[in-house]
Each structure stands twice: as structure tokens, then as C-alpha cells.
Image: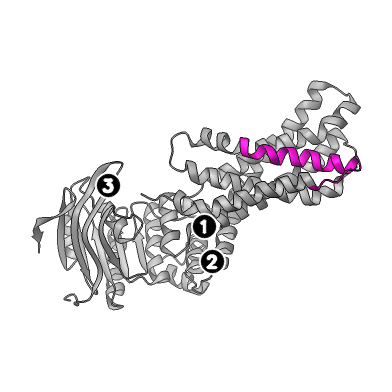
Amino acid sequence: MHPQLSPQAELTGVHVDVQRTAVLRGLDLVVAAGEVLGMVGANGSGKTTLLKVLATLVTPVAGTVRVRGPVVLLGHAPALCPQLTLRENLRFVAGLAGRDAAVADASLATVGLAAAADRRADRCSHGMRRRADLARVFVTEPSLLLLDEVQTGLDVASAGLVDHVLEVVRHRGGASVVVSHDRDQVARLTDRVVELVAGRVGPAVIV
Amino acid sequence: MTAWLQLVQITRKDLLIEARSGEALLVTTPFGAVALLFVPLAVGTDTPLLREIGPGLYWVVVLLFGLLVTLRHSAVDTPAQIALLRLCGVHPVVRLAGRAVASALLLLAFELLLVPVTVALYDPAPHGWPWLLVVLPLVATGLGLLGTLAGALAQGLDGRTTLGPVLVLPLAVPLLLGATQAPRAAALGHAPWPWLLLMLTVDLIAVLALLLGAPHLEEVA
């Protein structure tokens, strides 16, 4: 599917310093609605920082950021409270988002965790926690989904869930950004891939 | 969703975590009780002396161990969880206020659990006790707010376990003074209002600090 013209996120001349070190240096990027954008780059190239900028969690020292939300960021570590059950975690998110508790239960069923819904998060495998984190997408229905190495810890069967999640967001007219070290995986999941080099979108764009 | 409903959700979640883990209350309360027990063992069965020092010791234990309760409780959020809250539209003030409310409720429970222990060990004079109905919530609120602010300020710092108490203890001294002096003043027939006003002022300053400081304290990067 080709991306539509309207931007879901637009970054212009974005400059971010982390602990006095320039991580993003005048970065320009447009993520179109309906697009699944892949992003690769070496360690320290600024991928995770860029996702935080897109999530409006980090404010750049220079440049402009325009994002149409709501945004969901799924990072390296699942954002679950370990002492709560998977159901309680998802219901908490649903409550904050003003959604019904039943949406949380249905979301867990969608990611294949209905049977484990009442298990505490700290007693679940990493893959299960990762799937529960993915279920947030169905609870909050984001317009912009940001995935940071999200397939780490997922088995082959569960990895198909990421495809499904990306398709759901695209179907709603939203956009996704997928960050990974695995170029083959990114190329398979996304419409186009950009490479971050030293805090900028590099000249080489892998298609 | 209104900020009030989000605050309720956060408070409810924090209390659920505490009920599940028991980390703040179940671990700290027995130690507080042991601390109250050790003093009579050290000073012997001098009943008038124990009766005299009992209320003061109770508040010292509440302050020191309550500080642990609130600081432990403020350390539960990971950066990923804070990011989640922000992306769900939770304002930093609402996040910290929800935490402070949960902390205050835990501290109130902690205070109430130690009251019968103090009565059993020290047999304090019952004069001025009704004022505890006002003093206990004021101290719990103040400590909960101060601990939450200190926890947020020290979040992510290497020395957070040391920094937290260092930040809170000096600010909590007026609470200790008010808590010990208000019932004593009432027992002596004086008006306890100045001491209650002192505690209320600390609480209000802490509320103001939370309202003004929360957006600057939340750092996800």
C-alpha cells in the first residue's frame, strides 16, 4: 500500500542533545498517514531518541515537531507493572484512555493471552509481556505507532502479531515507525526504510 | 477523561500494587513496631518515663519509617511506565498527585497500625487524643507529598536512596513538631491551632510545590 499524502508526523531541522552530546543534528523526516516506515542505524545513531521525539517525550533544542496523535510507543522494555496481572495492566491503560474495561479483555484475547489474563506480569515470560504490551495498541487505538526493537523476545508464531498490529493501525489511517537492527525484518514489515547516520537521515535509503 | 478520574486510576493502581506486594506496609510496619519495642527494653520498666516519651517516640518512628514507606512507594515507576502515562494524556501533576494520594493513604494506615503498639508499650496519657483525628491525616498528607516530590526529584539518580531522606527530613521537622505539640497543648488546656496551622502550612506548601514543580520533575529522556 502506498502512503497517503497527509503527514502523520513531520520533523524539520530537529536537533536534540542528550547530556550535552548532540544525538539528532538537524534531522528532517516526514511520516505519511497510512505509512509503515522502517528505521535502521548503528548503535548510538539516534534511533531511540528519534522515537521519543516523535512520541513528544523529548523536546528538541531546535527544529519543529508536528505529530497527530494519539501515539503509542512500544520500547525495549514492556511498560507493564510487574505486580499487576496482565488484565489489570490493560484495564489501567483502558481507564486512562477513557475506554471500557471490556476493551482491555478483548485486546488480551486478540494477542492470544486470554488464558493468561489473570497472571501477574512478573510471572509471565518476556514474550508474553511483549504481547501484552502490543495489546495496548488495541486499547488506545493510536494514530501513530512507534515500535522499538519490538520483535525481540517474540517467537515465530507471535512475530506475526506485529504484522497484524501494523496492519490494524494502517487500516485506521494511522502510521507506524519500526526501529530495528535487523534490516531484513524491517524491510519485510515496512513500506520504506531510512537509515540514521550520526543523528541525521542518511543519504542511502534502502527500498 | 478528566484529570480527576485519571488521578483516581493512578491512586487505585498504586494501592493495588501495594496490596499485591506489601512492600511498603508489610515490610516497614513490623520494623516500626520493633523500633517502638526496643526503647522500653533499653530504658527498663520506668512507667512514668515511658508514658512521657511514648507519644514523641511514636512520631519519630512514624516520620523515619513513614519516609521509607513513601520513598519506596515513589520508586515503582520505570521510564517506560512514565512514558506510557504521558502518552495516555496524564499530566505530570496528575501522575504525582495520584502517587501522593496513594502514599498518604498508606502512611495513614501505617500510623494507625502503630497506634495500638504505642498504647500497649507506653500507656500514654489519653489527654488530647481526639486531636489525633486531625493530626494523623495532616502528617500523612505532608509526608506523602514531600516523599513523592523527593522521589520524583531523585528519580534516575545514583544516590536516590540517600538523597530522598536528606531532602525530606528537614522539611518534615515542622510536621514532627506540630504532631507532638498539638495534642500536648490540648492536654494542657491550650489551643492547639497554631501547631495544626503549622502542619497545614507545610501541607499547602508541598501541594504548591507539586503543582508548580511536577512538569519540571518529569524527565523521560
Q: Residue at x 16, y 76 (%)?
A: A2
- Tell which subunit mark 2 falls on: B
Residue A161 showing in the rendered view: no
Q: Marks 3/1: CA distance?
A: 25 Å
Q: Residue at x 17, y 68 (%)?
A: A191
Contact between marks 1 and 2 (CB within 8 A): the answer is yes
- Provide the residue designation for mark 2: B3
* The furthest residue to the left: A204
Contact between marks 3 and 1 (CB within 8 A): the answer is no
- Tell which subunit mark 1 falls on: B
Image: magenta residue range: B170-193
Q: Main secondary structure of the magenta part?
A: helix
Q: Are marks 1 and 2 on the same chain?
A: yes
- Residue neighbourhood size for the residue with mark 3, other residues' Cα within 10 Å, grouped as few (<14), some (14–19), many (≥20): some
- Tell me the element at label 2: helix
- Provide the residue designation for mark 3: A17
